[in-house]
Image (cartoon, rainbow, N blue to C red):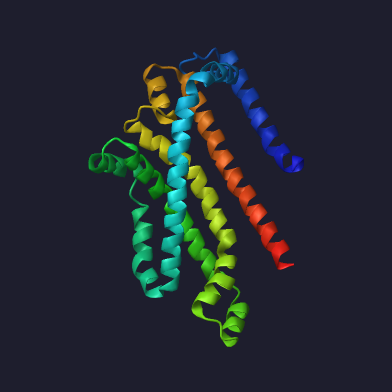
C-alpha cells in the first residue's frame, strides 16, 4: 500500500512546492492565485462554517448515487435479458450523454422547482450512464465455455443469469460505480449552482463573486476529498465482497 501511495504523494508534494514557490517569487496577488499555505489556513478557518455546506452536498450526492446505481442496474439487466430492447435503446442512451448536463439542469429546475428533486435528478442522470454501460459490458464478458456448459446442463435463463452472468459482471459493475461516485459529487455541485440554500456549489459561487479565490480553492479541495472518499469506499466494498465470495466458494 505504501509503495502504491508514495509516487502520487511525491508528485503532489513537488507540485505544491512549485506552486508555493511560484506564488511567492512572482508576488502573485491572493485574489488571482493564492498559495497552498494560504488555502490550507483558510480551510481550517472556514471548516466550522462549511459543515452545513458539506452535509448538503454529501446528501444530494449519496442520494443521487444510490438511485443512479439502482436505476443503472435495472436498465442494464433489462437490456441484457431482452437483446431486441438493447439494440433499440442502447444508441439512445449513448446519445443522451451528448447533452451537456449544465444545459439540461435549468429545464429540471423549471419543471420541478428549486427543491431537492431536481438536484437529485441531475446526479442520477450523471451516475446511471457509466453504471449501465459498465454492467452491460460485464454481461458480455461471460466465459463462453461456462455458458455453454450451463445450457447443456439444462439451466434455466434465470439460473444462468444469477449463477453466472451477474457474478461475472460484478467487477465491471463496481468499475462503473467508482466512476459514478466521482461524478456524483460533481453533479451535486452543478445542481447547487442553479439555486440552493447550502452546499459547496453555493459556497463556490459566493466566494467567486467576492473575489475570495482562496475559498474557491477550499471548496474545490473539499470536493476532491469527497470524491476520493466515495471512490475508496466503493473500492473497499468491492474488495470485501470479492473476498467474501471467494471464502464462500471455498
As drawn, 250 above or below 125: below
Q: Is residue 34 above or below residue 192?
A: above
Q: For the N terminus, give its image quadrant.
A: top right
Looking at the rendered structure, the number of numbered marks drawn on it comes to 0
Residue 142 is drawn in which quadrant? bottom right
Residue 203 position by quadrant: top left
Q: Residue furthest left?
A: 110
In the rendered structure, the answer to whether residue 59 lies left or right of residue 193 reads right
Q: Does 188 sit left or right of 102 as displayed?
A: right
| Residue 131 position in % (x across, y down) | 48, 56
Residue 123's place in the image compared with 154, above or below, is above
**Residue that appears at 48% across and 31% down:** 55
Residue 44 lies in what quarter of the image?
A: top right
Quadrant for the C terminus, please.
Answer: bottom right
Pick the residue in front: 123 or 98: 123
Residue 138 in view, yes or no: yes
Work out whether residue 40 or residue 188 is closer to the camera in this orientation and state it: 188
Residue at image location 46% in from the left, 47% down from the top: 65
Residue 33 at least partly seen: no
Q: Residue at x 30, y 42 (%)?
A: 103
Residue that appears at 65% across and 23% down: 17
Q: Position of residue 136 (x, y in %)?
A: 48, 64
Vertical comparison of 128 with 229: above or below: below
Where is residue 195 shown, x and y percent of the image? 32, 31
Measuring from the top left, give residue 36's x and y in whole percent. 58, 21
Residue found at the very far front of the displayed protein: 248
Amino acid at each position: 500500500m505504501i509503495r502504491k501511495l508514495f509516487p502520487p504523494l511525491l508528485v503532489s508534494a513537488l507540485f505544491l512546492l512549485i506552486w508555493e514557490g511560484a506564488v511567492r517569487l512572482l508576488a502573485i496577488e491572493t485574489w488571482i492565485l493564492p498559495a497552498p499555505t494560504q488555502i490550507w489556513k483558510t480551510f481550517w478557518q472556514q471548516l466550522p462554517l462549511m459543515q452545513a455546506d458539506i452535509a448538503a452536498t454529501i446528501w444530494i450526492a449519496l442520494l443521487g448515487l444510490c438511485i443512479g446505481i439502482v436505476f443503472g442496474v435495472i436498465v442494464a439487466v433489462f437490456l441484457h435479458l431482452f437483446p431486441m430492447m438493447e439494440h433499440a435503446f442502447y444508441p439512445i442512451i449513448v446519445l443522451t450523454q451528448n447533452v451537456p448536463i449544465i444545459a439540461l439542469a435549468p429545464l429540471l429546475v423549471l419543471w420541478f422547482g428549486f427543491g431537492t428533486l431536481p438536484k437529485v435528478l441531475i446526479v442520477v442522470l450523471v451516475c446511471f450512464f457509466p453504471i449501465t454501460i459498465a454492467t452491460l459490458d460485464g454481461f458480455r464478458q461471460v466465459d463462453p465455455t461456462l455458458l455453454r456448459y450451463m445450457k447443456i446442463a439444462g439451466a434455466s435463463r434465470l439460473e444462468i443469469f444469477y449463477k453466472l452472468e451477474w457474478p461475472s459482471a460484478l467487477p465491471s459493475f463496481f468499475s462503473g460505480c467508482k466512476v459514478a461516485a466521482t461524478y456524483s459529487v460533481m453533479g451535486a455541485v452543478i445542481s447547487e449552482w442553479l439555486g440552493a440554500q447550502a452546499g459547496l456549489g453555493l459556497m463556490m459561487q459566493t466566494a467567486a463573486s467576492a473575489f475570495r479565490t482562496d475559498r474557491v480553492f477550499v471548496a474545490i479541495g473539499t470536493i476532491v476529498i469527497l470524491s476520493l472518499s466515495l471512490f475508496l469506499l466503493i473500492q473497499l466494498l468491492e474488495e470485501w465482497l470479492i473476498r467474501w465470495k471467494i471464502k464462500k466458494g471455498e
